[in-house]
Amino acid sequence: MNKKLIILNTISVLFGILFSFIGLINTFWGNDFFYGLFIVGLSLVFYPPLGERFTKLTGMKIIGWMKILIGFFIIWSAVGVGELFDKVDLMLASFK
């Protein structure tokens, strides 16, 4: 593997972890269970082994600009529609 591919995979995994956390917060705090599961499902595209598996199953390759659009959608919907900051406050209050 070359250095560029390692760096891109690392960045992709980090965004996958971030988006998975956003999905889990929406799943377990607030009233958006299915929305949270949808976000967790979308975040799986960012994990390289699962992205390759998706390509083998569907024959459709997820390329860089598609990941950027999916990431933008997750951030936009979580902050705007999903009220992420309010749910983080709920989560932190439940741990106190």
Image (cartoon, grey):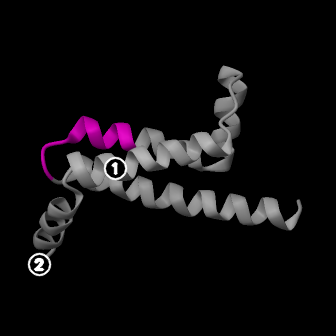
Query: Which residue is painted at 27% across and 38% down in the image?
Result: 35
Instruction: Return the x and y of residue 5 as percentages of the image width and height.
Output: 80, 59
User: What residue range appears in magenta?
Assistant: 30-39
SS class, disc 2: loop
Report the residue at 11% width, 78% height from top: 96
Residues at marks 2 and 1 touching, judged by CB atoms closer than 8 Å: no
Q: Amino acid type of disc 2?
A: Lys
Q: Is 32 part of what is drawn in magenta? A: yes
Q: Secondary structure at mark 1?
A: helix
- Picture quarter with the N terminus: bottom right
Q: Which residue carries the number 2 mark?
A: 96
Q: Does 86 sit left or right of 57 as displayed?
A: left
Q: As rendered, which of 4 and 25 lies closer to the eye?
A: 4
Distance from label 2 to label 1 (Cα)? 29 Å
Image coordinates of residue 16 in percent, x first then y, are 52, 55
Residue 74 screen position, x and y as percent: 39, 47
Q: Judge from the rendering whether residue 1 lies leftward or rightward of residue 44; answer left or right.
A: right
Q: Quadrant of residue 7?
A: bottom right
Displayed quadrant of residue 22 = bottom left
20 relative to 69 in the view: left or right: left
Identify which residue is drawn at 21% across, 45% down. 81
Q: Between residue 50 and residue 64, name the one nearer to us.
A: 64
Q: Main secondary structure of the magenta part?
A: helix
Where does label 1 land, which residue?
76
**Percent x, y for residue 95?**
16, 73
Residue at left offset 65%, top offset 21%: 58
